[in-house]
Amino acid sequence: MLPGRISKRVISDRLAWVDRMLSEIRALPLDSKTKFMQDKRNIFAAESCLRRALEAVFDMGRHIAAKGFGEAVTEYKEIASALNRRGVISVADLELMQKLAGYRNRLVHFYHDVSADELFEICASHLGDVERIVNALRSWLASNPNVMDETL
């Protein structure tokens, strides 16, 4: 695969999706575990929005690796490794992104092991981890405007 240009449209769509999913999570009653647990729909909404936000982050990372560097990766943890090898994310962000990849895989493949308490804790206290990776990707893209295909 040859490197090309990173689609501004794809990146913009994924960034908007992450922002929307995190906003939906933050609209849940995360200030009180009791309130959160009172309506079981909160649990399902939190799981769905968190999984979708993570998938959008990794879709964006995969697009950067493929289009920006000609590196085809399919495994979520390998996306993080490819971005680190290419200088897109730091070692610390690599470790965090791999942890997020593992969590996304748990949400998809081991959904029955993810408790409502765990979802509440992550949504109430750890959404900043997702934002940290998104901000690292945004920062790299802003620092490398020459790799962007500006056509929408």
Image: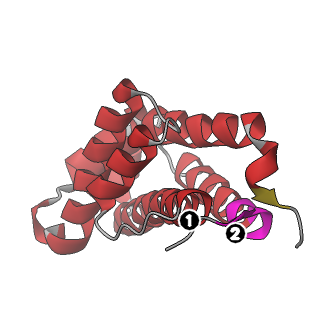
Q: Nearer the viewer, mark 2 or mark 1?
A: 1
Whole-percent x and y of residue 121?
30, 39
| Amino acid identity at mark 1 | His
Q: Amino acid at mark 2?
A: Val
Question: Does the image show residue 34?
Answer: no
Question: Where, by quadrant of the figure, is residue 45 drawn?
Answer: bottom left
Neighbours of disc 2 within 10 Å: few (<14), some (14-19), many (20+): some
Q: Which mark is residue 63?
A: 1
Locate residue 132, reporting x and y percent. 52, 33
Q: Is residue 9 left or right of residue 31?
A: right
Marks 2,1: beta carbons within 8 A = yes
Expressed as whole percent of the image width and height from the top left, the position of residue 50 reads 43, 58
| Range covered by the magenta-colored residues | 4-12
Say which residue appears at 59% left-offset and 42% top-offset: 137
Q: Is residue 74 left or right of residue 5?
A: left
Horizontal side of residue 3 vs 130, given as left or right: right
Is 6 one of the magenta-colored residues?
A: yes
